[in-house]
Each structure stands twice: as structure tokens, then as C-alpha cells.
């Protein structure tokens, strides 16, 4: 048994390379399986091995208002059947909100100033996500934007606090946690914001079905509206919908803002790659124009061309994975694998994905931003080894049918943000500072929240020589 304090110590995995072992958390044990079982495990349906049940168990769902995630899969259906199915359209819509929020959320300093890049990105990503999830005016409502950001942070904090105590104590500990009271207050606010949006959609839909046309009955094509149209009666209750919308922001804001922050931290640690990535953007602009500039050329045509940026992100994520044990599953029923390995019902299982990434490639300790780029072209597998594509040696977004359904949207958001950042700004570390270390909460990994960067607008040759 290994006690989990900081699982980066899972170099211990090398001792158990081809055999299961157990990692102990304060609240539960996790059986870590070799990745040789991945292809077999991915075939099991959610009724036998559930990723969602493992996730909500990590969130201590009974005490963090997230139980509805296992009572209904509406959140999964909307991401898979609406967001992913119409990905290019929604990326283009998100781009419009990125452009709106840019001058508001991103400072424009002529000289070096210290910035909290993580805070900046959370607000910008919150706008983009709100535009897709709930449309206008929610995407411009500062109360909702701040609520969606703090909800994510508060929910994680509450869950981690509860996980420090044995489960049998939760009924005593949870009711006295101030952070849990704050979550309840924010969910009440969410109901106050989302309720009128739901009423408006019902009214507009009724009027359209009655034959009315015109701008008064037109609406943004949002995920909220799709969920209302495709959800059952219980799923359409205001408390359910408000909580579900809040939970959706948890994954979208956290993953995307953290991805951008880590990219910039790694670029500042390896500044020779700034001009390489900028040159790639300039070459695409020569062919396709600026992103969103030309009619008929949107994210679908533009973003796949960012092959070097994609490769840099994959390498950044290899060194800074958002989670060290993935994909996680909860055994709903007893399972016996083909080699006789038995998994009792109730067992939490996972793979040591972070360590897999460190022993399935040459020179694993070297930061090689073009590792995936070269792998694609050397093997002729041009559609593989990309960000957001689950593979046996890249499990950050899960694996198989239960992989994260919003991963392609998250990667698209990261690329759109990075294009503007690289084109418009320069970054470096403050004097005497370097790449900040990551923080660990059980198997979860976060950039240092105190980390800062120096930022200024890019200077033209005339700027550098002092001419106007």
C-alpha cells in the first residue's frame, strides 16, 4: 500500500510496472492498474464501470450538491450531442466573445507590468463558456461570471476539505464548513440568474411554434436551450438546471485557464519557442487571413493548422498533467478481467497516466515541444498524437467512450486564446524567478496560484529603436 501525499512520488509505479497496486487517500483507496488493461476496460459500459460515479465520489457529491450528475446524464448528452457535434460553430461563437472580452480582461501595457495570468484567463474563459452555455446577456453579466469562477474554486476546496476526513465523519463536518454555506448561496444566485433565461426560452419557443417570426422570438443557440428541449420534466426543474449549469462551468473554466497558464509558464521557461509559434501563426494568416476575418474560414479551417502550438501544448501537459491518476472508474458491479484479475464492486480504479507519459517516450525528462509534431510526421499518423485525442500514452482527457466529451472545445479555446496572446504580447519571468512549481492535492495538480509573469505589448522594430 502507498500512502498518497504527493502522487508525483508515483515513481513508485516503476516497482509495480505490470501489476496492480493500491494508493491510499484519506477518504478512499485507489487501485492503480497497468495500462495494459486499458483496451479491455474501455469496453465496459457505465453500468459496470462508471467514470462519472468516480468523479462525483471525488467531489464528495452528497455534501457538495453534485449528486444530480449520477441521477441524470443530461450534462454528458449536451456536450456530446450538441457541443461536440457542432464544434466548429460553437468555437466561432466563442471567438466573438473572446474578441469582446479581450480589451476588458487583458491589460495593454506598453512597458513591463506584473500580471496574474491565471486570474486573467479565468475571467476570459468564463465569458467564452457563458456565451456557449447560456448566451447573452449571461456572458456579459459580471455577477454570473464571478459566480461561475468562484463556484469551481469553492467546490474543489470543499471537496478536498471533506476528503481529509473519514467518510463516516462527513455528516458532522460538512454542515459546519463555511465554504459549503457559500456554495449554497451561490447556487441560490444561480437560480435567480438562470430562472428568467429559462422562462424566456419557453416563451420564445411557444411564440415560434405559434408561427411568430422576427428578432423578438429569436434566441442564441445555447446549450441551456438544448438541455431544456431535450431534458425530461425533472431535469427541467430550475434547481436541477441551475446546479447543472454551475457544474458545467467547473470543468470548462478550470481546464482551459490552467492549460493557457501552463503554456505561458513553459514558454517563458523556453523563450526560444516564442518566435517559432509566432511564425506558424503568421504563415497561417498569409493563407487564411486572421482567425475569423474571412467569410467561410473559421475555427474548423484555422485551428488544425496550428500543429506546432498543438505539439507544444501536448508537451506542456505531459509535464504538467491536470491529474496524476486517470482515467478513474468506479466498479458498479464485481468485474473479473480476462487474466483473472478481480475488481470487487465499489472499487475505485485508475491508471498512473502521469508516469506512463514519463516512461513511454525517449528522453522523457527533456522538455521537447516538438515531440508530438515529429511523431506525427515520422510515423505518418497525421491525425494522431494531438491535444485532446485520448491514446494509451495520453490519458489526460480519459480514454474510450467515457473520455471527456468537452475536450475538443477546451483545446480549441486554448488555441484561440494563445493565438492572440502570442501575436500581441511578450512575456517573461520577473527578475530572479523561473518556472513555478506545481501544487498537489491528492492526485490533482495545479499551477502555483501565487505565480506571476511580466507582460507588455509586443514592440515593432520602430518601437525598439525609439522611433514612432
Image: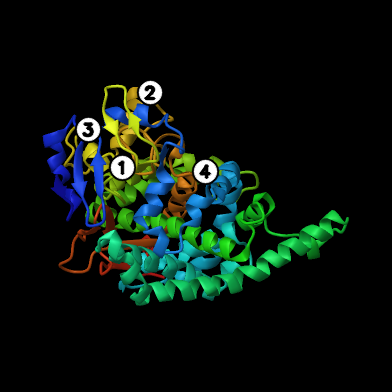
Instruction: Please identify, in this view, whether the residue under mark 4 or under mark 1 is nearer the observer.
Output: 1
Q: Going by the image, does 442 lie left or right of 193?
A: left
Query: How packed is label 3: few (under 14 Cα within 10 Å), some, or many (20 or more)?
Result: few
Q: Which of pointers 1 and 3 lies earlier in the amino acid sequence?
A: 1
- Quick check: 54 above or below 102? above
As helix, strand or loop, the secondary structure at mark 1 comes to loop
Query: How packed is label 2: few (under 14 Cα within 10 Å), some, or many (20 or more)?
Result: few
- Quick check: 145 above or below 168? below
Q: CA distance from mark 4 to mark 1?
A: 44 Å
Q: Which of pointers 4 and 2 lies earlier in the amino acid sequence?
A: 4
Q: Label 2 belongs to which residue?
A: 380
- Quick check: 313 above or below 146? above
Q: Residue at horizontal 46%, vertical 50%?
A: 410
Return the mark for residue 347: 1
Q: Label 4 belongs to which residue?
A: 302
Return the mark for residue 361: 3
As helix, strand or loop, the secondary structure at mark 2 comes to loop
Amino acid at each position: 500500500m502507498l500512502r498518497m501525499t504527493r502522487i508525483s512520488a508515483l515513481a513508485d509505479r516503476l516497482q509495480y510496472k505490470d501489476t496492480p497496486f493500491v494508493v491510499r487517500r484519506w477518504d478512499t483507496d485507489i487501485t492503480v492498474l497497468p495500462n495494459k488493461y486499458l483496451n479491455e476496460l474501455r469496453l465496459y459500459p457505465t453500468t459496470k464501470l462508471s467514470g462519472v460515479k468516480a468523479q462525483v465520489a471525488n467531489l464528495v457529491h452528497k455534501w457538495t450538491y453534485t449528486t444530480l450528475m449520477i441521477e441524470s446524464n443530461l450534462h454528458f448528452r449536451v456536450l456530446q450531442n450538441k457541443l461536440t457535434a457542432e464544434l466548429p460553430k460553437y468555437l466561432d461563437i466563442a471567438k466573438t466573445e473572446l474578441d469582446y472580452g479581450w480589451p476588458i480582461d487583458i491589460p495593454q501595457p506598453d512597458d513591463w507590468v506584473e500580471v496574474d495570468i491565471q486570474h486573467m484567463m479565468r475571467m476570459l474563459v468564463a465569458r467564452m463558456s457563458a456565451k456557449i452555455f447560456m448566451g447573452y446577456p449571461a456572458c456579459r453579466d459580471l455577477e454570473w461570471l464571478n459566480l461561475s469562477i468562484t463556484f469551481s474554486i469553492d467546490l474543489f476546496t470543499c471537496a478536498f476539505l471533506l476528503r481529509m476526513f473519514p467518510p463516516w465523519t462527513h455528516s458532522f463536518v460538512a454542515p459546519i464548513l463555511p465554504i459549503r454555506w457559500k456554495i449554497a448561496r451561490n447556487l441560490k444566485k444561480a437560480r435567480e440568474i438562470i430562472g428568467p433565461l429559462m422562462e424566456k426560452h419557453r416563451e420564445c419557443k411557444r411564440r415560434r411554434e405559434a408561427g411568430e417570426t422576427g428578432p423578438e422570438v429569436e434566441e442564441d443557440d445555447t446549450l441551456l436551450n438544448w438541455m431544456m428541449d431535450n431534458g425530461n420534466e425533472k431535469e427541467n426543474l430550475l434547481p436541477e438546471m441551475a446546479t447543472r449549469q454551475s457544474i458545467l462551468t467547473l470543468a470548462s473554466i478550470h481546464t482551459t485557464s490552467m492549460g493557457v497558464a501552463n503554456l505561458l509558464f513553459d514558454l517563458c521557461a523556453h523563450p526560444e519557442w516564442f518566435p517559432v509559434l509566432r511564425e506558424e501563426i503568421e504563415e497561417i494568416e498569409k493563407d487564411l487571413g486572421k482567425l475569423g476575418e474571412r467569410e467561410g474560414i473559421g475555427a474548423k479551417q484555422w485551428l488544425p493548422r496550428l500543429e506546432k502550438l498543438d505539439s507544444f501544448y501536448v508537451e506542456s501537459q505531459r509535464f504538467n498533467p491536470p491529474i496524476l491518476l486517470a482515467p478513474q472508474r468506479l466498479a458498479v458491479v464485481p468485474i473479473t478481467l480476462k487474466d483473472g484479475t478481480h475488481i470487487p464492486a465499489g472499487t475505485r480504479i485508475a491508471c498512473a497516466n502521469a508516469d506512463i507519459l514519463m516512461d513511454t517516450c525517449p528522453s522523457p525528462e527533456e522538455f521537447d515541444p516538438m515531440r508530438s509534431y515529429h511523431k506525427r510526421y515520422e510515423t505518418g499518423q497525421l491525425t494522431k498524437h494531438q491535444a485532446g485525442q485520448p491514446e494509451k500514452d495520453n490519458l489526460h482527457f480519459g480514454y474510450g467512450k467515457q473520455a471527456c466529451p468537452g475536450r475538443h472545445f477546451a483545446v480549441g479555446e486554448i488555441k484561440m486564446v494563445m493565438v492572440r496572446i502570442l501575436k500581441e504580447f511578450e512575456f517573461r519571468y520577473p527578475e530572479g524567478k523561473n518556472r513555478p512549481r506545481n501544487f498537489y492535492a491528492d492526485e490533482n495538480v495545479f499551477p502555483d496560484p501565487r505565480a506571476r509573469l511580466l507582460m507588455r505589448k509586443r514592440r515593432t522594430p520602430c518601437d525598439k529603436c525609439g522611433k514612432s
